[in-house]
Amino acid sequence: MSAAKKQPGKPTSDKDNLPCSYARFGPDEPLKLDCGVDLLNLTIAYNTHGTLNADKSNAIMICHALTGDQFVASEHPITGRAGWWQYVVGPGKPIDTDRFFVICTNVLGSCMGTSGPETVNPETGKPYGLEFPVFTIADMVRAQVMLLDHLEIPDLLCVAGGSMGGMQALEWAAKYPDRVCSAIPIAAAAKHSAQNIAFHELGRQAIFADPDWHGGAYALKGTVPSKGLAVARMAAHITYLSEPALHNKFGRNLQDRDKPTFGFEADFQVESYLRYQGSTFVDRFDANAYLYLTRAMDYFDLSTEYGGNLANAFRDTPTRFCVISFTSDWLFPTSENRAIVEALNAVAANVSFVEIESDKGHDSFLLDVPEMFAAMTGFIDAAAAPRNIPQRAA
Amino acid sequence: MSAAKKQPGKPTSDKDNLPCSYARFGPDEPLKLDCGVDLLNLTIAYNTHGTLNADKSNAIMICHALTGDQFVASEHPITGRAGWWQYVVGPGKPIDTDRFFVICTNVLGSCMGTSGPETVNPETGKPYGLEFPVFTIADMVRAQVMLLDHLEIPDLLCVAGGSMGGMQALEWAAKYPDRVCSAIPIAAAAKHSAQNIAFHELGRQAIFADPDWHGGAYALKGTVPSKGLAVARMAAHITYLSEPALHNKFGRNLQDRDKPTFGFEADFQVESYLRYQGSTFVDRFDANAYLYLTRAMDYFDLSTEYGGNLANAFRDTPTRFCVISFTSDWLFPTSENRAIVEALNAVAANVSFVEIESDKGHDSFLLDVPEMFAAMTGFIDAAAAPRNIPQRAA
């Protein structure tokens, strides 16, 4: 277990010493947020893999999902687990670090080193808590643009991500079309649905209900709203899987017993699994960050700034798109992904659509799904071809 | 607001004076539970509508769902709302109280007058709380059988119910085939799925997480675990609706504002709706009862006692069945209802199957769905015909 492991009341400065890079922006380089606030002293924690080529033409931005982070292809310092996209990012993998320069930031407002509610507010000397400004998916991408400028990289060969990461990929392509050669939104949506807002609100209410949350000021109180955050995680986790996946994985199997105990222990394997998901999550994630990130997703409706017509977001786009969905994903179902494709088709954009047969649900994008790897590999290599990047090793 | 409204620390004896009937069984008439405990001093709170005919051939048992009660066709004493199945039960309605004698009990372990965790344990003089024995769907039906015997009614023209009520209808038909002329399980399943167990466990964890729950002994502490129970209700409520229903009803509409507030207020209508559902539920429902009833549903797998083969539960059954499902129900989807029909077909039982096109989700069985009313009316009238019951008024 790393030194970064959260302890009640422990200052959060350990998040300044994670095994990653940090870009620190001064008070004269504010991040201008959609809510109207200028966020000063922005820190972006990020990881890179591979080498930027002389042309600076081989950079790929990977955007993580709600509870992801910059440890896309390296060991997580708290959990010790392999990078969250180990199947996709690495030497010879679809996002081939032998040829591409991969950047993955911890998104704005999260809790792995980038500025967020855990960060100390320079004006008060205390962690922001709920004084951190509410931000949007567009703000997350603005922060990534600042990093790209900081790294003096003109544009991206590709921006890719699943779920909330796919929202960022869409935002990148819509707002910075000249800096995005290709985009791969996976298991995403151009707007968050009523049902998804409802699930997020449920999770937030679970956190608000925890007396250890203290109106968001738990860092000052020396508490951690673990129970509320665990309940929020359990709710979300159910939505990340599919009914068939739960059925195939657990069914009605009992946990370490032959018969039910007629009590409230975790008689069923699925209960034990959920409890485990809840309890391990609180070791690595911050409750306030969870509130802010879910809110950013709720607010996401890319069409809003384009007169309610999503197609307008992509008019005359030079970006190539590969939209990927999974048949059993009920959180960001194929219909939502198809709506993106239809908007792109309406403006004659270059778009491939790959709907992958999978019974694993929304989380399929994190799993070993060869059909997804094949689609990504072919698409990225085609985008790389005109940019003076070597071919993939045979 | 009725005197039955729950107040922290208030004794629960007000549940003995609800506008309904009570059957009280003595210590010599135990309810023998599946867990091995004999529950003494059982009280069953129930309502009846219509008149039992001289042949005692016109009785219909209606079984309620998880958070339902005996106020199936009369005003709820706490909420003041009309009976929960007002569309189905009443004069001239599908379950026609001009011709049938309707019985609806508050199920075992619930909180509207029937014995449950709120009840005072005669051995300790305190509310049972978690000392109430864990019971099953079969135990709920055993209690209803005791009531039927108490009322000296030999058999039922029909047993009908949706969701958990449908589970009870299946249990009735399987265990007491000679006392069930016909059965209408609606939006039900013969076993609770892994996903449904997961949602229930999530709700229970939300209750356990509430410090006002006090290990179930909140009545003694003068507290009510309102926040935890509200979160549990919100989670469940999402599952009772469908994604299209939420989309059509709320979409991404904002609540009483033109733009998002960049905060954690209920910006979206769907959030406001969920919060309302959570907060009103705690006025009428008991947190411990919620734990026990969800547990009973989790444990339900009718095939278990029949060698894992559901068909064996209905071998040689004289009961007629009408199984009803709704296309947009993802909690008890058509596939689960079809599994019941297939088991009945395997033993050549008399079964109709009606899958109703509805975008309203699981809760459709509580709504104004004319196709359901037509199916029920035809089915019940056919069952009534040979039992010396007058024809429906033209």
Image (cartoon, coloured by chain):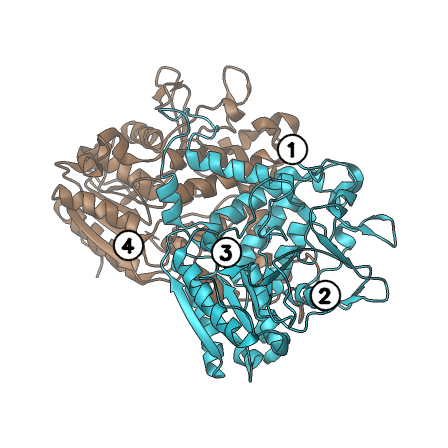
Chain colours: A brown, B cyan
Contact (CB < 8 A) between labels 1 and 4?
no
Contact (CB < 8 A) between labels 4 and 2?
no
Asked whether the residues under marks 2 and 1 belong to the same chain, the reply is no
Lower position in the chain sequence, tag 1 or tag 4: 4
Asked whether the residues under marks 2 and 3 belong to the same chain, the reply is yes
Whether residue B106 is situated above or below residue A297 in the rendered picture = below
Which residue position is annotated with label 3?
Answer: B88
Asked whether the residues under marks 4 and 2 belong to the same chain, the reply is no
Q: Which amino acid is tagged 4?
A: Pro
Contact (CB < 8 A) between labels 1 and 3?
no
How far, Cα to Cα, is label 2 from label 3? Answer: 24 Å
Image x and y of residue A186, in percent = 31, 49
How far, Cα to Cα, is label 3 from label 4? Answer: 58 Å
Image x and y of residue B133, in percent = 75, 59
How far, Cα to Cα, is label 1 from label 4? Answer: 45 Å
Residue A211 numbered mark, or none: 1
Q: Is residue B337 left or right of residue A216?
A: left
Q: Which amino acid is tagged 1?
A: Pro
Q: Say which chain tag 2 marks.
A: B
Q: Say which chain tag 1 marks.
A: A
- Residue at 66%, 71% (x, y): give it: A258
